[in-house]
Image (spheres, rainbow, N blue to C red):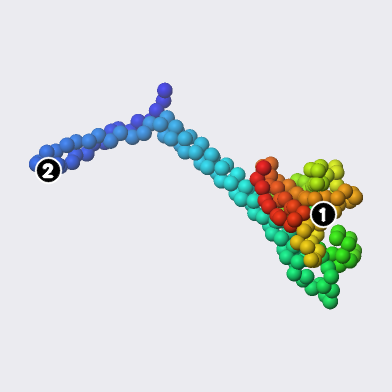
Amino acid sequence: MVSIKKKPSAFSLQLSGGIKKSFVVRGLTLIELLVVMGIFSIISLVVLANHSRFNSSVLLGSLAYDIALSIREAQVYGLSVKQYGSNFQVGYGLRFAGASSYTFFVDTNANKRYDSGVDSIVQTFSISRGHTVKSFCGITASGVQECSPSGIDHLDVVFFRPDPDALFSSNTSTVYSSGQIVVTSPTGETRTVKVASTGQISVTNP
C-alpha cells in the first residue's frame, strides 16, 4: 500500500507548576484523505437529490392550489354576478382540455359550458417547469368516472347565479355530480384537485 506520511511534528505546552508536556501531531495519509472526501461527496449528493425532490413537491402543490384558487375565483365571480360588459346574466368557469394549460372563461350565452368563438376568455393559464395536467375526470352520482384522454377530451366547470353549485360538462352527454383534475410533476408525483357539485373544492395528495 502506498501512502504519503508527514513527519510527526511536536510541540510543548508549559503547564502550571512548572510541568512541561509534549504533544505529537500526526498528518492524514492519502487513503484517509480520499475516504473523507468520498464520504463528503456521498452526503452532498444525497442532500442535493432530496432538495430537488422537495422543490418539485412544493411546486406541484403550488400548481394544484393555483388551480383550486382559479376555480374558487370563478365561483365567486358567478355568485357575485360580476358584470361582463353590460351583461349581468353570465356565468364563469374553467375549461380543462390539455396537459399544459387551462382556460378561465365567461359563459356569455349562459348555456353552462364553454363555446369557442362565442364565450370570452378571461385568461389562459400555462403550466410550466415540467408539470402537466395528467388527467381530468367527470364523476357520476354512482361513482363512474369518465377521464381524459380516452373517455373525454375536455371538462368544463361552471358557476352560475344564484346557486354556488358547480356545473360539469364534457364532450359526452353524461351528467356529472363532481369532477377532478390530476396534476403531475416530472418525478411522477401527483396532486388531485376535487370539485363537488355543492361547490366544495379540495386538494388531496394520493
The furthest residue to the left: 17
Amino acid found under the numbered disc labelled 1:
Phe
Percent x, y of residue 28: 36, 33
> Which labelled disc corresponds to residue 35?
none
User: Vertically, is 202 above or below 16?
Assistant: below
Count of marks, rendered view = 2
* Along the viewing direction, whichever of 130 and 172 lies nearer the viewer: 172
- Name the quadrant containing residue 88: bottom right
Residue behind mark 1: 168
- Residue 110: image location, x then y, percent: 87, 65
Q: Residue extending furthest bottom?
A: 86
How far apart are the alpha carbons under marks 1 and 2? 88 Å
Quick one: 19 or 180, which is closer to the camera?
A: 180
| Residue lying at 56% horizontally and 46% vertically, measured from the top left | 51
Res. 95 in view: no
Note whether residue 39 is visible: yes
Question: What secondary structure is marked by label 2?
Answer: helix
Res 23 quadrant in image: top left
Query: Which quarter of the rendering shows the C terminus?
Result: top right
Where 119 sits versus 61, above or below?
below
Query: Percent x, y for residue 151?
Result: 85, 44
According to the image, label 2 marks what residue?
16
Relative depth, front residue between 32 and 76: 76
Residue for point 42% across, 30% down = 31
Seen in the image, is 188 located left or right of residue 39? right
117 lies above or below 128: below
The image position of residue 19, as x and y in percent, is 11, 38
Residue visible at 86% across and 50% down? Answer: 175
Disc 1 vs disc 2: which is toward the camera? 1
